[in-house]
Amino acid sequence: MDSFRTMDEMEMSINLQAIRLAWVYGLLFLLVWIGYEWMNKGLFNGIAFILMTSQLVIFWIVQLFLKWKLGKNEK
């Protein structure tokens, strides 16, 4: 019995939107956390900053790679 099935376009669209919103929420949460500790406590939270910046770097790298790969396949 096959427990996995392929998603249709509507399910893929809903999942993609949920992932995007969760990712933006995570980035905003980390940004607020870093800003709060820096403004109120005078501390710089390095781990939260590394997590936030690494998320952005990975996002940009994957985005550039996928655009390059898709552009390469269209020719």
Image (cartoon, rainbow, N blue to C red):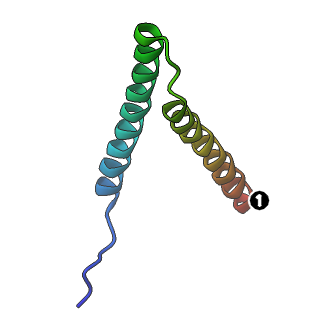
The image quarter in which residue 49 lies: top right
Q: Position of residue 25 (x, y in %)?
A: 36, 32
> Could you say which is closer to the camera, residue 66 or residue 22?
22
Residue located 44% across and 31% down the image: 27
Q: Say which amino acid is labelled 1.
A: Lys
Quadrant in the picture for the C terminus? bottom right
Q: Position of residue 44 (x, y in %)?
A: 53, 21
**Count of number-bearing discs:** 1
Residue lying furthest top: 39
Residue lying furthest bottom: 1
Could you tell whether 39 is left or right of 60 in the image? left
User: Is the residue 7 above or below the residue 38 in the image?
Assistant: below
Residue located 37% across and 45% down the image: 19
Residue located 48% across and 33% down the image: 48
Label 1: few (<14), some or many (≥20) within 10 Å?
few
Residue located 58% across and 40% down the image: 54
Q: Position of residue 39 (x, y in %)?
A: 45, 8
Name the element at disc 1. loop
Quadrant in the picture for the N terminus? bottom left
Could you tell whether 1 is left or right of 37 in the image? left
> Could you say which is closer to the camera, residue 40 or residue 64?
40
Q: Position of residue 28 (x, y in %)?
A: 41, 26
Could you tell whether 66 is left or right of 68 in the image? left
User: Is the residue 12 above or below the residue 30 in the image?
Assistant: below
Could you tell whether 51 is left or right of 24 in the image? right
> Could you say which is closer to the camera, residue 16 or residue 75?
16
User: Is the residue 56 above or below the residue 16 in the image?
Assistant: above
Dot 1 corresponds to which residue? 75
> Could you say which is closer to the camera, residue 21 or residue 72?
21
The image quarter in which residue 6 lies: bottom left
